[in-house]
Image (spheres, rainbow, N blue to C red):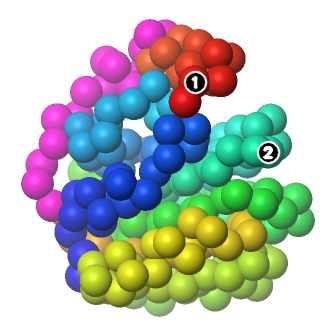
């Protein structure tokens, strides 16, 4: 298993200034602590919407890479997005799914199908250009440059364990301030 914060720390140097990072729930809290930046889109409010929000951003900014930091429980809430994303084929779209088998921020309750759900198989069946699974940090690190360079959409499912506990700042992620910071940076074409 990979500690989520170590996976995110590994991702951080590969994120370019113009990339849009769409993060949800615990991955969001960890990412905001590890890589605060104006082009972090905080996808909150309705569990499962990270992939749909990311698709909208990819359609509106086709020249930018979009990196989705999704959870397994979150993605289960919106599996239909996989088919829509694959059909639209956003070119610079990396969908990272952090699989730990639980709804982590909602009490750690198990997700349906824990241990049998195959997100890689679902992404491929939906029509993603590629999908792969990682359970070792070094393999994920070695694959990252290619994952980010591939024509999308591409999915990487990381079998994770929680790492360091980062603050869960719900006030910030639900704030108008978080949305304004992102919107202003996007409108300025911030780099």
Q: Residue at x 25, y 27 (%)?
A: 169
Secondary structure at numbered mark 2: loop
Give the residue pinned by disc 2.
62
Horizontal side, residue 24 vs residue 182: left or right: left
Q: Residue at x 53, y 12 (%)?
A: 180
Nearest the eye: 68 or 143: 143
Disc 1 secondary structure class: loop
x and y, in percent, of residue 55 in the image: 73, 48
| Of labels 1 and 2, the one closer to you | 1
Rendering quarter of residue 152: bottom right
Q: Is residue 146 left or right of residue 57?
A: left
Residue 142 higher or lower than 72, as above or below = below
**How far from the left and from the top, in percent, is residue 77?**
59, 56
Our reading of the magenta stretch's main secondary structure is loop
Tag shown at residue 83? none
Numbered circle sitting on residue 190: 1
Q: Residues within 10 Å of mark 2 (few under 14, many from 20)?
A: some
Q: Is residue 96 visible?
A: yes
Question: How many neighbours does mark 1 have within 10 angstroms: few (below 14), some (14-19), or many (20 or more)?
Answer: few
Residue 174 is a magenta residue: yes
Q: Residue at x 75, y 78 (%)?
A: 129
- Quarter of the rendering containing residue 46: top right
> Magenta segment range?
163-177
Q: Nearer the viewer, residue 151 or 45?
A: 151
Q: Is residue 165 above or below residue 60?
A: below
Residue furthest to the right: 87
């Amino acid at each position: 298993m990979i500690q989520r914060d170590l996976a995110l720390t590994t991702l951080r140097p590969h994120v370019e200034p113009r990339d849009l990072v769409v993060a949800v729930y615990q991955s969001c809290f960890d990412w905001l602590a590890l890589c605060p930046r104006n082009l972090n889109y905080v996808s909150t409010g309705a569990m499962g919407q990270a992939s749909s929000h990311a698709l909208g951003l990819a359609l509106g900014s086709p020249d930018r890479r979009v990196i989705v930091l999704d959870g397994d429980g979150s993605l289960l809430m919106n599996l239909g997005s996989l088919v829509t994303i694959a059909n639209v084929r956003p070119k610079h779209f990396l969908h990272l799914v952090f699989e730990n088998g639980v709804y982590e921020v909602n009490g750690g309750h198990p997700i349906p199908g824990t241990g049998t759900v195959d997100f890689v198989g679902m992404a491929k069946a939906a029509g993603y250009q590629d999908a792969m699974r990682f359970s070792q940090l070094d393999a994920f690190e070695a694959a990252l440059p290619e994952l980010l360079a591939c024509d999308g959409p591409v999915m990487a499912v990381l079998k994770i364990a929680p790492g360091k506990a980062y603050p869960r700042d719900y006030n910030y992620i639900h704030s108008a301030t978080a949305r304004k910071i992102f919107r202003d940076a996007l409108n300025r074409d911030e780099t």
